[in-house]
Image: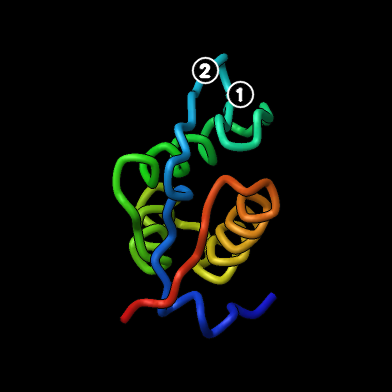
Amino acid sequence: MSKAPELDLCTINVPVNANLLFKYWDEECVVYNNLSGETHLLEHYGAELLSSNNEQPKTYQTLLKKLTTDFDGSPQAEIAGHLENMLTHFQELNLIEMKTCD
């Protein structure tokens, strides 16, 4: 999977007025989105990344650097593919918005 060029230039944040609530169990987490009224089951690590964006928007490169550090020894292309899949999934669930940086 090749990285979409716009991911280098975007800020990833939780939608405006969204209040995401997290509840963790072992390796899983449920996330409630007050805007949609939906609850989603996520893997623990993905929920932690999402939660960090709930506190402050991040860039794709910041998230990639965190994942690369956390999964030291894994090929960067594999890590980038995993991050892209997570972000696409979160966007499909309306848990994040990706915006181009000005």
- Mark number displayed over residue 30: 1
- Badge 1 crowding class, 10 Å Cα cut-off, few under 14, some 14 to 19, many 20 or more, is some
Which picture quadrant has residue 26? top right
Q: Position of residue 85 (x, y in %)?
A: 66, 58
Q: Give the percent coordinates (x, y) of residue 91.
A: 62, 55
Q: Is residue 72 left or right of residue 26?
A: left
State the residue in front, 85 or 55. 55
Compared to residue 69, the image places residue 78 above or below, namely below
**Corner quadrant of residue 43:** top right
How much space separates mark 1 and mark 2, taking CA atoms? 5 Å
Give me the residue at 57% from left, 28% from top: 31
Query: Which residue appears farthest toward the bottom when viewing the image?
Result: 5
When the figure is inspected, residue 4 is found, relative to residue 37, above or below; the finding is: below
Give the secondary structure at mark 1. strand
Query: Which quarter shows the N terminus?
Result: bottom right
Left/right placement of residue 29 relative to residue 76 reads right
49 or 13, which lies in front? 13
Closer to the camera in the image, 99 or 78: 99
Q: Which residue is mark 2?
A: 23
Q: Are marks 1 and 2 in contact (CB under 8 Å)?
A: yes
Which disc number belongs to residue 38?
none
